[in-house]
Structure formats: C-alpha cells, structure tokens
Image (cartoon, grey):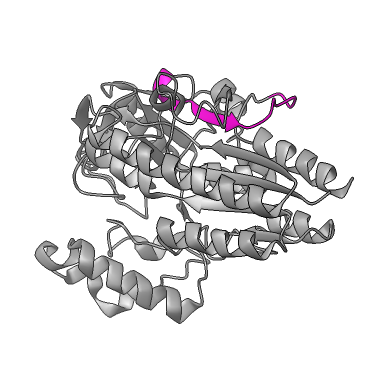
C-alpha cells in the first residue's frame, strides 16, 4: 500500500487562534493544545526539527556574546558605527547589508542584523549560520532530514526562503509524481500577519480561509496518488497583543557602565540577556533589573524548566523576561514595538501552539519537541 505522511508547519498559528474556529474540522478533527518552547521561532524550529531542547541543540536567540570568535569583527573597522541613525537604522539598508555579510561568510541559514547596533555587533556571534532544514544543518545533533535519510525514506522538505505559495506548489508537484513518502511543508506568513494585526485582526479569517483552501487541494492531490494519507498541521507558538512598552536599554545604559568592559547585553523583543564582565557591574545592574516594571529575572528553577540553563551561560548570565504583552522598545530586533509579539512565558494562554491531525495522536504532546517523536512514529508507519 502506497503511503504518505504530510506535516504542515504554520508559524504562529497558536491554540487561542484555532480553538474556536471550524478550520478543517472535517479533515483534521483531532486537535491538541501544545506547550510552546521558551524563546522565539529561532528556538522552536530547531526544537521541532530535532526533538531536543535548547541546551542540546544550542539554539535560543540569534545573537550571543562571544568577542573572541565573532564573525563581525570587520564591522569595527569599517566605521559603520559612525553612520547617522537616519541611514544605519533603515530596514532596507540593514537587509541588503545582511545579504552581503551572509554571502561573504557563506552563511546558508536565516540571517538578519535586525537593529543590532553596528558599534557593538563585533562583540557577538550568530547561531544560525547554516541551513537547519538540510542534512547536517544542526550538526552534531541529528535533524529531521538526517533522520529521514538514515531511514531511507523519500522525502520533501520545503525551502524556507520561498514564499508560501511557492512551497505549496513545489509539494503539489511532488505529490503528483507520487515518489515521496514524507513531506514537511513550511509556511511562515501567518507569523508576520499576526505581528501586524494581532490575533484579533479581521485579516486572520481571510488568511485561515486561504490555508484551508490550499490544504484541501493538497489533501485531494495526495489521495489521488496514495492509498493511505496522514496529514497534520502544527505550529510553534501563538501571539500576544501589545500591552505596553518599556525602554530597558535606557534603564541599563543610564547606569554609566561601559558596554564591552563592564557588561554586554542583547535586548530581544521580550527579554534582556546580560553578561557581567565584573562583579561591580553585576551588582549595579541586578539591582536595577530587580526594580524594572512589568518583568522579572528568571530564577534557576525557571531556567531549568524551560531547558535554557546553559552551563556556560552562552545566552547570558542573567535573563530578564517581560510580562505577557509588554515589549522592549527600542530593542536589538527592532526600534518600535509591534502590535503582536511572542516569546513570553510559555504558560501564558496566548503562548500555546496547536496541532491538528487527520488521525488520533497517541504520542503525548506536552511541548513542541514532541512533534519530532510523532514524525519518527510516522516514519516507522511508512516502513511497515
């Protein structure tokens, strides 16, 4: 019997978005709320592709303090830090420069400079230098492609660089050929839409209808070329509407400490990650952070619970997390807060991911890393 297992990833399609919608209930009647991996998609996708936690696959946020091995040392000597903000802060300028840097260093993974200050970037390394979807992309940890090849299963994995419609078209062509038995379809536009209009935006219904129409077409194509079809749609997290903004960068910088001598920091959208370069700076900064509004410092129990207790403090000696809905702005990911954001506490209702399946799922779905075990089980099913 000819079989195929199709797993479709819809970025940011959280449980709160899907739970009250009739979205594909006839085709995908089995629906599950799934815990989010702490962090952003930069954490969640490696977790999904390996079934491992961040302390194993080493991906959390994009940037981490590593001045000795930073690939951006040349930035210090190019004088980019002297550019006026009217030029240096333009998204188009940074996007084009990011492409130049990626090509120069041979980066094959997703790479953007975002709003990381040119005057500081030479102190940091970047984690996603390689394409994490291809064989060896998360080496030494085995990823989905490695596992499929080890099991000699013919597969299709989307090109994350392409638009959703292109990825759907590419999978459709492979389904028509009938030569693959496993597919991982990557779609990411929902995330950007939710950042702009939040989970309550009218545009969400339109986008969900677009997904529904295309999934029905894919299912019909699969059923025309295979006798047994398994179809699952899943996400990595949800989206939380903006509640307010805190300028954490200003709070730290007004202390008068020297960046790169006393401390280093990355200001993500929902957390501050700090490295202390002397004890005096540690005491001063921690006292300030303990009083910061709408936030708290993650304690050791939380770091362990979220599997981000890196023994080498790779992503910071201290992490301050914002309360749900409260964003850091300006931050190193962008100068302005967005209407919607993710990356808050996984326990918050807006954080939960979702999985919809054509068949009952026996695998316990506690967190998104369990998707990998489900995909492994379907590989065994394909080989029977």
Q: In which quarter of the image is residue 117?
A: bottom left
Q: In this view, does 87 lie to the left or right of 56?
A: left
- Region of the chain picked out in magenta, as a range: 349-364
**Along the line of sight, which residue is nearer the eye, 34 or 85?**
34
Instruction: Look at 46% across and 35% down and name the residue there.
Output: 318
Instruction: Look at 20% across and 36% down and name the residue there.
Output: 247
Measured as percent of width and height from the top left, residue 45 is found at: 55, 46
Measured as percent of width and height from the top left, residue 154 is found at: 75, 61
Measured as percent of width and height from the top left, residue 60 is found at: 52, 45
Instruction: Look at 30% across and 33% down and name the residue there.
Output: 205
Is 28 within the magenta?
A: no
Q: Please state, as top left, top right, bottom left or bottom right, where the C terminus lies in the image.
A: top right
Give the answer, above or below, for where 223 lies relative to 373: below
Q: Is residue 149 left or right of residue 157?
A: right
Give the answer, above or below, for where 91 lies relative to 21: below
Instruction: Look at 78% across and 61% down and name the residue there.
Output: 149
Q: In this view, does 45 lie to the left or right of 337?
A: right
Is 355 within the magenta?
A: yes
Measured as percent of width and height from the top left, residue 206 is found at: 29, 38
Q: Which residue ends up furthest to the front in the rendered image?
A: 224
Q: In which quarter of the image is residue 40?
A: top left
**Along the line of sight, which residue is nearer the eye, 344 or 313?**
344
Q: In this view, does 51 lie to the left or right of 18?
A: right
């Amino acid at each position: 019997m000819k079989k195929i297992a199709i797993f479709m990833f819809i970025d940011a399609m959280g449980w709160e978005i899907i739970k009250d919608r009739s979205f594909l209930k006839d085709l995908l009647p089995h629906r599950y709320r799934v815990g989010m991996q702490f962090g952003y998609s930069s954490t969640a996708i490696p977790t999904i592709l390996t079934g491992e936690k961040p302390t194993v696959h080493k991906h959390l946020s994009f940037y981490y303090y590593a001045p000795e091995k930073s690939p951006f040392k040349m930035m210090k000597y190019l004088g980019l830090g002297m550019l006026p903000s009217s030029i240096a802060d333009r998204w188009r300028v940074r996007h084009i420069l990011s492409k130049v840097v990626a090509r120069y260093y041979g980066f094959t993974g997703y790479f953007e400079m975002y709003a990381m200050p040119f005057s500081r970037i030479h102190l940091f390394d970047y984690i996603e230098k390689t394409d994490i979807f291809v064989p060896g992309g998360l080496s030494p940890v085995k990823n989905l492609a490695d596992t499929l090849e080890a099991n000699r299963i013919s597969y299709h994995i989307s090109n994350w660089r392409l638009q959703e419609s292109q990825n759907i078209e590419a999978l459709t062509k492979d389904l028509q050929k009938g030569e693959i038995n496993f597919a991982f379809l990557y779609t990411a536009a929902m995330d950007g839409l939710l950042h702009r209009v939040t989970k309550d935006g009218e545009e969400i219904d339109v986008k969900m209808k677009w997904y529904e129409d295309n999934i029905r077409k894919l299912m019909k194509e699969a059923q025309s070329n295979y006798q047994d079809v398994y179809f699952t749609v899943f996400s990595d997290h949800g989206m939380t509407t903006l509640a307010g903004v805190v300028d954490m960068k200003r709070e730290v910088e007004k202390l008068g400490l020297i960046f790169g001598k006393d401390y280093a920091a990355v200001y993500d959208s929902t957390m501050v990650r700090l490295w202390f370069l002397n004890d005096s700076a540690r005491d001063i900064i921690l006292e300030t952070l303990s009083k910061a509004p709408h936030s708290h410092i993650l304690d050791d129990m939380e770091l362990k619970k979220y599997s981000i207790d890196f023994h080498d403090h790779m992503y910071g000696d201290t992490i301050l997390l914002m309360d749900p809905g409260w964003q850091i702005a300006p931050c190193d990911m962008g100068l302005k807060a967005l209407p919607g954001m993710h990356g808050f506490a996984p326990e918050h209702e807006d954080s939960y991911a979702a999985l919809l399946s054509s068949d009952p799922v026996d695998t316990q779905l506690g967190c998104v890393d369990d998707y990998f075990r489900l995909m492994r089980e379907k590989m065994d099913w394909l080989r029977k």
